[in-house]
Amino acid sequence: MTRERQTVVGLTLAAVIVGGWMTLHVWGVFFQPLSGTALFVVPLLILTQSWLGAGMFIVAHDAMHGSLAPGRPRLNAVIGQICVGAYAAFSYRKLNVCHHQHHRAPGTAEDPDFHAERPEAFLPWFYGFFTRYFGWREFTIVTAVLIAYLLIGATVVNLILFWAVPAVLSALQLFVFGTWLPHRHTAGDGFADHHHARTIPMPWVASLLACFHFGMHHEHHLTPAAPWWRLPEVRKAMLARSERL
């Protein structure tokens, strides 16, 4: 695939994900009614926004690897910052530095996304994962936006349902399928190589819904330049190659 085609596909998918997330965010926070038959739509809106929120991070992740728009580092950085900034005021630069350190030493004490003290435990690992990136800077910015939303007409209930809940759910989604399951240590279950990463076998649709194919994590570590939407293709090629050997 040429760089130009990868850029067009990547940016188109990014526009759909980011545009969808922002549309549902604004609609949910300011306009979604919470009475009558409209209540039946609420769970679907929350789950869709959570999934798109995870997608925002996957888009930013591709930007970190330069696979969103190959050969255009400035464009990658701008889109990456838009994604993580809109989500929860995260710093793209900090995330980028830590993520590349993760790839240099995955599943070791030098990996900022790994919990070396208890590499099998869920809650301590998630707590460290979350607090590493969401600090006082992010808290201050999010609080300021929250106050602004309330001043221009948002309600507390809508903010909880369509901002706080999707944010927590998507953070859990990213952590479970993109970090914990692929990199955790389990009794008698080793890793294939020094990447200390495993793939979570799932059907294509389940893989997409779980975390934009990021559960194909060993393939990602082997080919970090492949964007999220090409990971099924990469996995298929690797499986075919192993069968021929």
Image: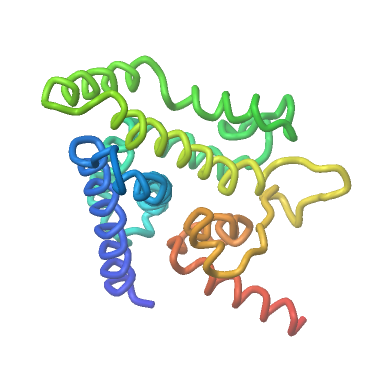
Q: Quadrant of residue 80?
A: top left
User: Front-most of 196 and 35?
Assistant: 35
Q: In this picture, is 47 found above or below 236?
A: above
Quadrant assignment for the N terminus: bottom left
Tag count in the figure?
0
Is any part of residue 56 visible from this angle?
no
Q: Residue furthest front?
A: 36
User: Front-most of 30 and 3?
Assistant: 30
Q: Quadrant of residue 11?
A: bottom left
Is any part of residue 169 visible from this angle?
yes
User: Front-most of 177 and 106?
Assistant: 177
Quadrant assignment for the C terminus: bottom right
Q: Residue at x 50, y 28 (%)?
A: 130
In the image: residue 89, left or right of residue 54? left
User: Front-most of 183 and 225?
Assistant: 183
Q: Residue at x 29, y 32 (%)?
A: 158
Q: Quadrant of residue 111?
A: top right
Q: Position of residue 215 (x, y in %)?
A: 58, 56
Q: Position of residue 70 (x, y in %)?
A: 32, 62
Q: Residue furthest left?
A: 152
Q: Residue at x 70, y 29 (%)?
A: 116
Q: Residue at x 33, y 70 (%)?
A: 6
In the image: residue 217, left or right of residue 225? right
Q: Position of residue 59 (x, y in %)?
A: 36, 52
Q: Position of residue 50 (x, y in %)?
A: 41, 45
